[in-house]
Amino acid sequence: MKRTIAALFLSAAVPTLALAAEPDPLESPLWDYMRQQFIGQDPYRFDDRIKVNLPEFAEDPTQVPVTVDAEALKGNIQRIVAWADLNPIQHIFTYYPHPQIIPRVSLRIKVQQGTAIRAAVLTKEGVWHVGGSYLDAAGGGCTTPSAAAGNPYWESHLGEMKSKFFPREQGGRYKFKVIHPMDTGLVDAIPEFYIEQVVVRSDQGDDLARLKLSQPVSENPVITFDVRDNTQKHSVWLRDNGGNEFEQAL
């Protein structure tokens, strides 16, 4: 009986030991803390198939292009979470792609300093697949006032959108821009004001993908995503933390 109990304790400890033994390939001092915040105690593995594409250096820390690509997991995805380890506000987005939407998204972010940028992809088996890249940056992007802070233009054009569709051999790509200051709340006397939800809908009104954004997304967001069917029409709906809603056909 004692041997059976000991064996049970040993078998329960093995996954924990295996999880703790896998070193962070980016050697970030905050990896364990970030893992607890965004993944918790769920099983995970570092996976080269999860691509986080960044420039070598952030020339403009308020507008850093980031592409997260999880297409290699072949649609076996529940959600994607992206964050920047050393930002004062780490969460960038959480993405819930529909099978009709390719799990690849591009946008621009603000960074406060050089940092690891991560993407963790939860599969239907309950395992997180983690990818990432290191971004070198001079910093200051999260505490720089938006251009809108000194320009009344955005008040009369808030939520205006422009979009373009790029047909491809298989599927197509949407790229859209929305006028919004995306204030982080980290600048004196400027409260946080940012788009927090984006929903891509079919022409029948069905929700195909949901994107939850946080304050580090850049001013006047430019978001790119891919669809599998280039014959179907789509629209996008957005809401900011002030309760403003915007919707437009793409």
Image (cartoon, rainbow, N blue to C red):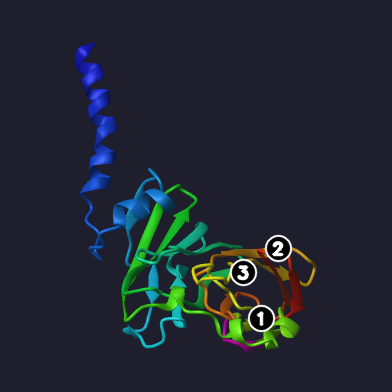
Give the residue number, with chain letter if any, for mark 1. Answer: 230
Give the structural element (helix, strand or loop) at label 3: loop
Q: CA distance from mark 3 to mark 2?
A: 25 Å
Name the residue: 39% across, 77% down. 140
> Residue 40 placed where, x, y %?
40, 46
Q: Nearer the viewer, mark 2 or mark 1?
A: 2
Residue linked to disc 3: 193
Which of the two discs, 3 and 2, sits closer to the camera?
Answer: 3
Label total for image: 3
What segment carries the magenta color? 164-170
Residue type at tag 1: Asn
Residue highlighted by disc 2 = 207
The CA span between labels 2 and 1 is 17 Å
Residue 77 in the image: state x and y as whole percent.
51, 58
* Nearest to the observer: residue 83 or residue 132: 83
Q: Residue at x 60, y 74 (%)?
A: 228
Between marks 3 and 1 in the image, the one whose residue lies nearer the viewer: 3
CB contact under 8 Å: marks 3 and 1: no
Which comes before the other along the chain, label 2 or label 1? 2
Cβ atoms under marks 2 and 1 closer than 8 Å: no
**Residue neighbourhood size for the residue with mark 2, other residues' Cα within 10 Å, grouped as few (<14), some (14–19), many (≥20):** some
Q: Quadrant of residue 236?
A: bottom right
- Residue 67 visible: no
Q: Position of residue 14 (x, y in %)?
A: 24, 37
Quadrant including the N terminus: top left
| Percent of width and height locating residue 207 | 70, 63
